[in-house]
Image (cartoon, helix red, strand yellow):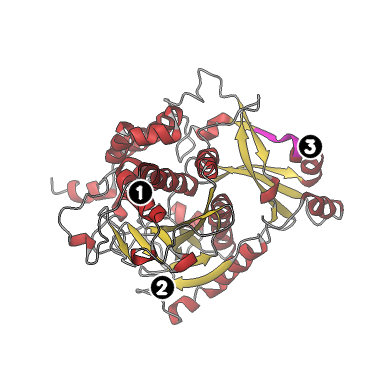
Amino acid sequence: MSGLALADLERLVAAGDVDTVIVAFTDMQGRLAGKRVAGGFFVDEVAAGGADCCNYLLAVDVDMNTVPGYAMSSWDTGYGDMVMVPDLSTLRLVPWLPGTALVIADLTWTDGRPVVASPRSILRRQLDRLAARGLSADVATELEFMVFDEPYRQAWASGYRGLTPASDYNIDYAMLASSRMEPLLRDIRLGMQGAGLRPETVKGECNRGQQEIGFRYDEALVTCDNHAVYKNGAKEIADQHGKSLTFMAKYDEREGNSCHIHLSLRDADGTAVFADDSRPHGMSDTLRGFIAGLLATMRDLTLFYAPNINSYKRFADGSFAPTALAWGLDNRTCALRVVGHGRNLRVECRVAGGDVNQYLAVAAMIAGGLYGVERGLQPPEPSAGNAYQTAGLQRLPATLADAAAAFQASGVASEAFGDDVVAHYLNYARVEVAAFNAAVTDWERMRGFERL
């Protein structure tokens, strides 16, 4: 719950305290898309009836170019409408935008059928699979970002080159250098708290100007909704401060931006099912099967953890980003890190970067984990040393093209998500790979303009 009931919104609109309601969903790229709706119109019409939007919003690239290959949306089908159906449990105020509230929407077709390629729908399907087993998932996402002294429009005009990081050196856990960013970081924390999120900590990270704000875990869908609000809102607040920040997986040759995802399961009584003090390492058979399934499916489903060309540049030995398919007990060299004790025991997936679509990644974690639980799989022994240097371990796909090929060949993906979803996101990957292959980069000019 985000803390604003429809009746409360009605009173705020009537009093003139709220005049705008943002109705939004998360697109394939993980961005909020939607409409600003007049407060009175939302209360009278949209809250119950939804709002239309063009179905091309789930069939464009990051530049909003219409691209071929999507069965659900094309010039041949006329680029018709979808309906944004507000999930009123997500209704909240947006403190950094005057007079504004926001609600997350599900997507349906005009006849009421769900849009299966919607990231939120994909996650809902996996949550339904858990519910059928009497289980639910608690999730937290840990997003890292880098802060720059230039505002977004200036950064755009420079081609995002020559930007000034908000610190000059490694600021991991540093208080002094992070204090320079505290006015911005404080406004982000307080803004998110006012929007119904529960911020817990903020800390510097290794790269220049790099920070992480931690939020309390919640039900999986709630966390993913909040993640979308936070990521969009942090950028808006940074711009209000005359700064910019980026969540891209790898901004420069130094440490990238991660999005570590913590997940645990509980039963209908709220009992944590990953913990069993009678078993080795306090891990239940359910957790062991879940980890085994994650390892068995990780290569097949990497596309949902690392959806962009740039995602794969983050995977580097010795960078705190994983390269090997390994799990360990509080071992940050592994793709999967088991952390916590007792009812707080959980698995941390370290594969995703800050560019991830959180709905897809959490859906992949649940699908992969259930694959192991349902088949009674057992994980290997935990990695106790440096997984970067351990021989014999499988590696993550090295490129988006490699990940797409694994996704296409995977029976796991088709079984978990359906052929329509697999085809849709394979096309997304193909479009990105083709665009990158056609681009001429600064690196190529530097090496080839004069010397070749």
Which SS class for mark 2?
Answer: loop
Q: Provide residue 281's location: percent of width, then percent of height.
A: 35, 66
Q: Percent position (x, y) of residue 69?
A: 42, 25
Point out the frontmost of discs 2 and 1: 1
Q: Amino acid at mark 2?
A: Ser
Depth check, front residue: 379 or 426: 379
Residue picked out by circle 2 = 167
Q: In this view, which residue lies farthest toward the right? A: 15
Determine the secondary structure under disc 1: helix
Above or below 46: residue 420? above
Secondary element at image label 3: helix
Is 432 located above or below residue 246 in the figure? above
Q: Which mark is residue 45?
A: 3
- Residue count near mark 2 (Cα–Cα under 10 Å), binned few <14, some 14–19, many ≥20: many
Disc 3 versus disc 2: nearer the observer: 3
> 10 Å neighbourhood of mark 3: few (<14), some, or many (≥20)?
few
Residue depicted at x 41% and y 53%: 286
Q: CA distance from mark 1 to mark 3?
A: 44 Å
In the picture of the structure, the residue carrying the numbered disc 1 is 294
Q: Earlier in the sequence, mark 2 or mark 1?
A: 2
User: Residues in magenta?
Assistant: 48-52
Question: Does the magenta-highlighted stretch encompass residue 287?
Answer: no
Q: Please state which of the two labelled residues, at mark 1 or mark 3, is closer to the viewer.
A: 1
Residue 160 visible, this orientation: no
Give residue 333's quadrant in the image. Answer: bottom left
Q: CA distance from mark 3 to mark 2?
A: 48 Å
Query: Is residue 296 in view?
Result: yes
Locate residue 286 relative to residue 26 in the image: left or right. Answer: left
